[in-house]
Image (cartoon, rainbow, N blue to C red):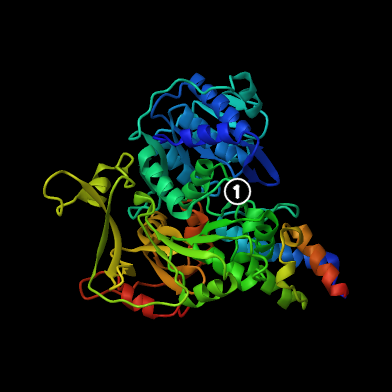
Amino acid sequence: MAYVLQQLLSKSAKAYPEKPAVWARGKSITYRELDERSNQLAHLLRKQGINKGDRVGLFFPKCVESIVSMLGVLKAGGVYVPLDPQAPADRVGYIIGNCGIRVLITNSEKRLALAPETLSTLECCILTEGAADGDNLIEWSWLSEFPAAQGPAVTLIETDLAYILYTSGSTGRPKGVMLSHQNALTFVEWCAEEFQVRSEDRLSNHAPLHFDLSVFDVYNTLEAGATVYLITEDLAVFPTSLANFIETQGITIWYSVPSALMLLLLHGRLTADKLKSLRIILFAGEVFPMKYLRQLAEVSQNTELYNLYGPTETNVCTYYKVERERLAGRGEAGELYVRGPAVTYGYWADEEKTRKMVVPNHFQAHFEEKMYRTGDIVTVGDDGNYYFQGRRDSMIKSRGYRIELGEIESALLSHPGVREAAVLAVPDEIIGNRIRAVVSLHISGSLGVLDLQQYCASRVPKYMIPELIDLYDELPKTSTGKIDRVKLAAEPAGVR
Amino acid sequence: MIESAEVKDRIREYVLEEFAKTKGINQITDQEVLTKNGIIDSMGIFRLVAFLEETFNVRVGDEEITHDNLESIDAIERLVIAKSKK
């Protein structure tokens, strides 16, 4: 039994050396190549001073080298931190500083997008693409100088950290969820058993690698000796191409947020024929509107559908198999708490947040145990399933991304010209929520909607930039002087 | 008959104003791959298509919404010109 993630690769590299492990952008690598390349990268990282527990950032668009990098960092004993390749330089710089990344795996184009202050904190950059035309730059081709047959000797145990995933934080800065090998393996082994992933399977990877849905795609592939097909932006944006891709590559297991499946349904010209290779569709991250779930169930008659649930902090902790003909249940609403080996230790360099979210389990009288507060308000139905009712805080989902509205408000308020800002979620059938901001300025007319959007673009990821911004002279207040969000939500966008 | 240069100008202006600038990108070339840096995402592509249909009086089917047809301002112009000749 594996106790660290890289053992999943070693096992499959022995069993299926010549089988393709990863496919991306028309290129694939076999298990043997993945094993050898990641061994070489691990040696290189050790040479660059990476020791047990050191964080290594990954900052480049999804490609075969992404998976080599994840495994290479783990084999060096390090902790990888996938960074959103489309995030603004300011946010990436914050994360690099927050978790103390000194070695970054990137490409020449992405490296140039970083701020000089960020670059000056890095000891070296390893480039997956492009020439090393400067100090402290290492070309990918240098990997071949290192031993391929075996990785460096490193002693790790299952409670050591494997990766950190940054998610939106309510205080204006993203927070780093720390996940151990055990956290991930508990989830991966459960999935392997539950979904019987086999070496013949072809898994898709739709989610970005900084998004925890990708943990299943990557590590369950390695666990089973299967093949993972990384879906890059040239496919993800075009529903008919994506539908054809599922058919031509013979994808058998699909996992994504519901909004991706809804775009396929609405614009992908989906037919039962296109989906005939699919045996399992998993979805998670947001509510799947019943109307579209029914359409999906209709067009994928021979596919099993599962709704997985679990915030990044807990991996997946419960799920619901979609039965094609039932629904119901009622009960009392309460907050869902999660315990068990898949639950995170907390947030990197943020004890206060950790204490708030990862709390002692008072229901466990005989020994100490921690549990994670999800913030999701649920009811338990008579059928034992949990029914999502809403959120305890102002976290929302848009296209499956977790967004703290407070983080966007902080971004807007940090602009010297902005006096007040309230950010609201506007429910949307397809993407879950659209983001609307209502802003008042110190000097009316001094800033336009585009100025504010551009300013946000320098502070938050693209999916968090308000799509709609209304400028008010003053924001409405409640009797206690707080911004009246209820009133704002009732006023349609663009009325003033 | 609509002029090729005019088509390109209107497409460039729309992409720049509607997508690039709101994401903090103030300059794009006609060859730039629009999906690469998230200038156009999976929802944006349908707004773009609606704009093309309305502005140039062409019809773009779901099966034509592909990377090859819409990857850059150059590609979009080719698609619109080919369609308006029909």
Above-or-below relation of B45 to A186: below
Above-or-below relation of A56 to B73: above
Above-or-below relation of A202 to B73: above
Instruction: For mark 1, name the chain.
Output: A
Badge 1 amino acid: Glu
> Which residue appears farthest toward the left when viewing the image?
A365
Q: Nearer the viewer, residue A42 or A7?
A: A7
Measured as percent of width and height from the top left, residue A15 is found at 57, 34
Residue A70 appears in the rendering: yes
Element type at mark 1: loop
Measured as percent of width and height from the top left, residue B66 is found at 72, 62
Quarter of the image with the N terminus of chain A in it: top left
B69 with respect to A250 (left or right) = right
A277 with respect to A334 (left or right) = right
Q: Residue at x 71, y 52 (%)?
A: B32
Quarter of the image with the C terminus of chain A in it: bottom left
Above-or-below relation of A149 to A114: above
Q: Residue at x 55, y 71 (%)?
A: A296
Q: Nearer the viewer, residue A397 or A276?
A: A276
Q: Residues within 10 Å of mark 1 (few under 14, many from 20)?
A: few
Measured as percent of width and height from the top left, residue A363 is found at 15, 54
Measured as percent of width and height from the top left, residue A168 is found at 40, 53
Residue A448 appears in the rendering: no
- How many numbered marks are there? 1
Residue marked by disc 1: A200
